[in-house]
């Protein structure tokens, strides 16, 4: 095998990678556009367990100027990425993947879980 065949093989792999990345990004963008009008409802649904466990008289507050807008928007983006992920065939891999995604979601939204 000469170097020209190896180079062409690398180029074909890069073209395949580019097409797969474009499909993945397009899928995420379509899901974000579809879910964005429901960002408030999605945020309320996901935040309801946190709100129900707060003590009486306490509430969640926004710590930044743009937080009331950005937090539901970030949640829609993360949910779109999670939905567009391919599912594994083994249930252990799927549950590990979902657990990792929820940990990432909690970290990105900067929730402070009580110990």
Image (tube, rainbow, N blue to C red):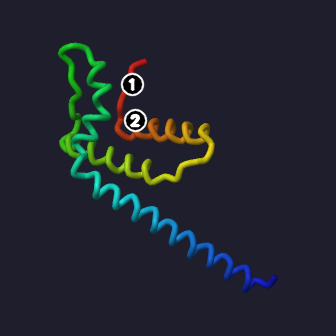
| Image x and y of residue 90, in percent | 62, 43
Is tag 2's residue or tag 1's residue first in the polypeptide sequence?
2
Secondary structure state at the residue bearing disc 1: loop
| Structural distance between the alpha carbons of marks 2 and 1 | 9 Å
Q: How many marks?
A: 2
72 relative position to 65: left or right: right
- Name the residue that disc number 1 marks: 113
92 relative position to 65: left or right: right
The quarter in which the C terminus is drawn is: top left
Residue lying furthest top in this view?
56
| Image x and y of residue 62, in percent | 21, 34
Secondary structure state at the residue bearing disc 2: helix
| Image x and y of residue 67, in percent | 23, 41
The quarter in which the N terminus is drawn is: bottom right
Q: Are marks 2 and 1 in contact (CB under 8 Å)?
A: yes
Q: Nearer the viewer, residue 7 or 51?
A: 51
Residue 79: mark: none
Residue 106: mark: 2
Label 2 crowd (10 A; few <14 / some 14-19 / many >=20)? some
| Image x and y of residue 66, in percent | 20, 44
Label 1 crowd (10 A; few <14 / some 14-19 / many >=20)? few
**Residue 19 vertical position relative to residue 114 in the rendered view, above or below:** below
Residue lying furthest right in this view?
1
Residue pictured at 49% horizontal, 65% vertical = 21
30 relative position to 62: left or right: right
Residue pictured at 34% horizontal, 61% vertical = 30
Residue pictured at 18% horizontal, 15% vertical = 57
């Amino acid at each position: 095998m000469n170097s020209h065949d190896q180079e062409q093989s690398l180029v074909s792999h890069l073209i395949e990678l580019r097409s797969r990345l474009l499909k993945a990004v397009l899928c995420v963008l379509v899901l974000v556009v579809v879910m964005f009008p429901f960002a408030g409802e999605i945020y309320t649904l996901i935040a309801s367990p946190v709100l129900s466990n707060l003590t009486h008289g306490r509430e969640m507050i926004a710590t930044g100027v743009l937080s009331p807008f950005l937090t539901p928007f970030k949640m829609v983006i993360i949910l779109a990425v999670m939905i567009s992920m391919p599912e594994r065939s083994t249930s252990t891999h799927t549950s590990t993947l979902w657990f990792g995604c929820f940990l990432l979601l909690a970290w990105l939204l900067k929730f402070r879980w009580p110990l």
